[in-house]
Image (tube, rainbow, N blue to C red):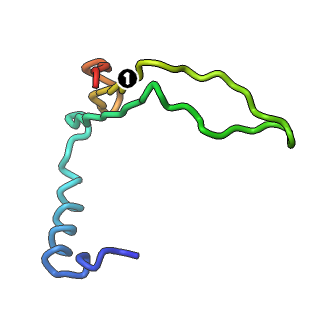
Amino acid sequence: MLPCEQDRPDVARKRRFWKRYQANIDPTRLVFIDETWAKTNMTRTHGRCRKGERLRARVPHGHWKTLTFLAALRHDRITGGTQELPG
């Protein structure tokens, strides 16, 4: 499926312009800000064991946190350092 807006003349015109414009962009000047996260309570709720046996495993319990990581991505490296933010 494709969005039906792609068939509109104004959208098609803007898409053609954008494709032509991309040739003028210097990729060495682009910086993308990327964010990702992880929770310390991301524990599996299911596991595998032999048929008829009970799965026993230890998991962390207590004060859970959400960690956020930010990075500035360039065409050849990560700049600005990766940061860990609380919350």
81 vs 1: above or below: above
* Quadrant containing the C terminus in the rendered view: top left
47 vs 20: above or below: above
Check disc 1 and report the residue beneath it: 65
Relative placement, left or right, of 20 versus 75 is left
Decide which of 27, 33 is in the foreground and name it.
Answer: 33
For the point 45% across and 24% down, which residue is it? 40
Please identify the quarter of the rendering in which residue 74 is found. Answer: top left
* Quadrant containing the N terminus in the rendered view: bottom left
Q: Position of residue 82 (x, y in %)?
A: 32, 20
For the point 27% across and 28% down, which residue is it? 72
Extreme residue in the left direction = 10
For the point 35% across and 29% down, which residue is it? 76
Decide which of 65, 75 is in the foreground and name it.
Answer: 65
Q: Position of residue 50 (x, y in %)?
A: 85, 38
Q: Position of residue 38 (x, y in %)?
A: 42, 30
Q: Amino acid at mark 1?
A: Lys
